[in-house]
Amino acid sequence: VVLNAAPMRRLEENLLKHVDILIVNQIEAEALLGHPVATIADAKAGLRKLHLPCPTIVVTLGEQGLVYNSSQIPPTHLAAPPVDCISTHGAGDTFVGALCARLVGGDDLYAALSYASRAAALHVSTPFELRHTIAPEGVEAFARTLDA
């Protein structure tokens, strides 16, 4: 079960016991942690101190990438692909959808997060009128340009 905590609201422990992956953006992380999350270090420190019943938490930080942890992994940073951002509108939805699709397809957490991060980067760097054309093949092609 993946829960995207947008928009931020009180998250009951009884709900979180049934969540496998909790996803929060920077603003939601600040509300959850009770302090500013302006940097990767802030997110890592906050996740080290946070004790929730869900096994995995992902904090998305826009162009700074993301920080995630799980019961087996300490807070870890994953850099965002460098892109020229047109607009961040819809980036979170793209990230969550791509992450879920890859997890259902059998990817491990790291691979799914990497793919989702690349899908979101492609989304924010694509003109509005072309965003509807983004498909898995396009994300894979974009990833190959990053790896080259």
Image (cartoon, rainbow, N blue to C red):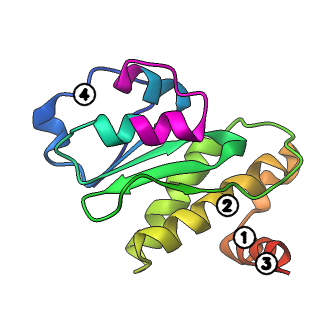
Tell me the SS state at disc 3: helix
The secondary element bearing badge 1 is classed as helix
Residue that appears at 42% across and 37% down: 45
Which sits in the foreground, 93 or 145? 145
Which SS does the magenta portion mostly show? Answer: helix
Residue that protrudes farthest toward the left in the picture:
14
> Where's residue 46, x and y in %?
39, 34
Q: Give the Cα distance between marks 2 and 3.
A: 14 Å
3 or 4: tag closer to the N-terminus = 4
- Which amino acid type is shown beneath numbered disc 4? Leu
Residue in the picture at 80% in, 71% down: 142
Can you identify the residue that label 2 sits on? 119
Residue at the spot of label 3: 147
Location of residue 4 (image quadrant): top left
Residue behind mark 1: 139
Image position, residue 47 (x, y; %): 36, 40
The answer to whether one can see residue 25 in this image is no
Between the residue at mark 3 and the residue at mark 1, the CA separation in whole angstroms equals: 12 Å
Q: Earlier in the sequence, mark 1 or mark 4?
A: 4
Q: Residue 120: within the magenta?
A: no
> Would residue 56 be found to the left or right of residue 112 on screen?
left
Q: Circle 4 is placed at which residue position?
A: 11
In the image, is residue 100 above or below residue 65?
Answer: below
Quadrant location of the C terminus in the rendered image: bottom right
Dividing the picture into quadrants, the one containing residue 107 is: bottom left
Of badges 1 and 4, nearer the viewer stands 4
- Identify the secondary structure beneath mark 4: loop
